[in-house]
Amino acid sequence: MGKNRRQSALTKSIQTGVLRDPAQQFHKTAWGRLLAFFSLFKIKLVRHDQELFRTLRREIWQFDENEYQDSFRTSGGQPPLKTMGDLGYSGSTFFGTLDGRYVIKSIPRHFEYTFFQSDLLEPYYDHMRDHPDSMLVWITDYLIAPYSTLGTVLSWTPAHHIIMENILCGKSDDLASNKWETYDLKPLEYFYPERDLVPEPLVSEDTLNRLSDHFEDKLHLSREDYNTFIQAMKTDTKFLEDANAVDYSMFLVRIPASSTPECLGRKSPWRAGIRSADGKWKYRAVILDFFWAKHKLHAQALSGVVQTFNVVGRQGHMSITTTSTDYREKFLAMVEGMIQIH
C-alpha cells in the first residue's frame, strides 16, 4: 500500500510539473517550505532549464509542442502515468506515458544527477544542436524538486527525473508487437561482481537478466547505412569520452520489416527504423544511461573496491571503473562485431 501510494503521488507530481504553465512562477514562503518539508510522498516538481529543452524539442528534434503536452494529459480517472518498475542497479524508478511515447526515469543518486545537471547538460545541448540525428537518447525534459522534503531527504521519493523518448514508440499499436525484440548491450569483457564473484545459485535470475544482453545475430546493413551508423557512433561516443562518461549501453530494437510504427519528431534514421539489408527487419537504436562519470566521488570509491577484488580474484576492470577511453574502444568494438555488411 505504501509503495502504491508513493508511486501514485510521484506520478501526479511529474504530470503536474510537465503541464504547469511555463509563465507560472512557483514561490513558497519560509513557513510554507517548513510545512512542505514534512511531506513524505507529495512533492512539487518544476522544469529545470525550460528554454533549453524547449529549443531541443521544437527546433532540433521538431516535436509538436501540443502533442508533447497531450502525452501527459489524462482524463476519466486514468492514472497520470503507468509504472514500468524499478529497473537496473541504480534504484531508479521508471514510468511511461499512457500513449507509450515517453519514458520518465528517476535519478536518485547524487553523483549521477549532479553530473548531468552541472557537467553534461550544456555540452549535451551543444552536441544535439550540432548533430540533430545523434544516437544519444533524446532527453526532452528534466524535472527537479525546488525544495527539500522529508521524503526526498530519506530517499523515499526521488527529486530528480529525466523525460526521454521511448524508442519502443508505436509497439502497442503494431499487430506484430509480439515479434519485436529488444537488447540492452554493453561490452562483455568487463568484470561484474554480480556475475563474476557471487556463486551462481545465490544470484537471482532477475539480477542476471539486468546484466547486458547478448545479440546472437548480426545487424545486416548496406555499406551506406553502415558508414552512417558507425560515424554517428564514433561521434557520440567521442562526446561521452570527453565528458569522462562510462557504462553507457546501446539499446537495440529489432522490428518485423512489415511493421510501420509511429516515429516521434524528426525522422532520424535509427529512430524511424533502418531496413535490414536482407529485408527481414527494421532496426532502431539509441545510446542510453550515460550518467556515470569517472571523476565523481562514488565512481572513484568503487574503483578502490574493485582493486581490492582484483587482489584476491584477479578480475578485470568493471565498466563503471575503467577509463572513458577504454570503455569507448570496447564499446565501438562491440558494435563493429555485431554488423555484417551487404
Image (cartoon, rainbow, N blue to C red):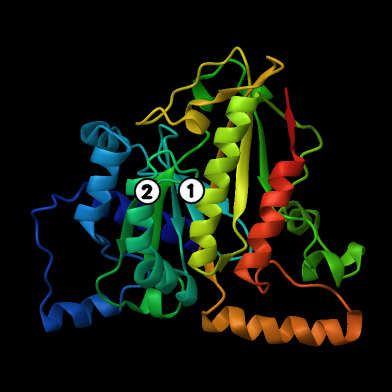
Please tell me which residue is depicted at 51% across the width and 60% down the height of the picture: 240
Three-letter amino acid code at disc 2?
Answer: Met
Q: Quadrant of the C terminus?
A: top right
* Viewer-nearest residue: 205 or 127: 127
Q: Give the alpha-carbon distance from disc 1 to disc 2, as whole Å.
A: 8 Å
Please tell me which residue is depicted at 40% across the width and 73% down the height of the picture: 114
| 214 sits left or right of 72 in the view | right
Q: Residues within 10 Å of mark 2 (few under 14, many from 20)?
A: some
Mark 1 vs 2: CB contact within 8 A:
yes
Label 2 sits on residue: 128
* Viewer-nearest residue: 231 or 136: 231
Q: Residue 315, image x and y in percent? A: 85, 74
Say if residue 92 shows up in the picture: no
| 251 sits left or right of 14 in the view | right
Q: Residue 156, image x and y in percent? A: 46, 71
Please tell me which residue is depicted at 39% across the width and 59% down the height of the picture: 161
* Viewer-nearest residue: 182 or 135: 135
Q: Residue 143, image x and y in percent? A: 31, 59
| 6 sits left or right of 72 in the view | right
Relative to 248, does residue 287 appear above or below in the rendering? Answer: above
Q: Residue 25, image x and y in percent? A: 9, 62
- Dot 2 falls on a residue whose secondary structure is helix
Relative to 108, does residue 188 appear above or below in the rendering? Answer: above
- Dot 1 falls on a residue whose secondary structure is loop
| 133 sits left or right of 312 in the view | left
Quick one: which residue is furthest to the top in this view? 258
Label 1 sits on residue: 136
Three-letter amino acid code at disc 1?
Answer: Leu
Please tell me which residue is depicted at 32% across the width and 36% down the height of the picture: 71
Q: Residues within 10 Å of mark 1 (few under 14, many from 20)?
A: many
Label 1 vs 2, first from the N-terminus: 2
Say if residue 307 shows up in the picture: yes
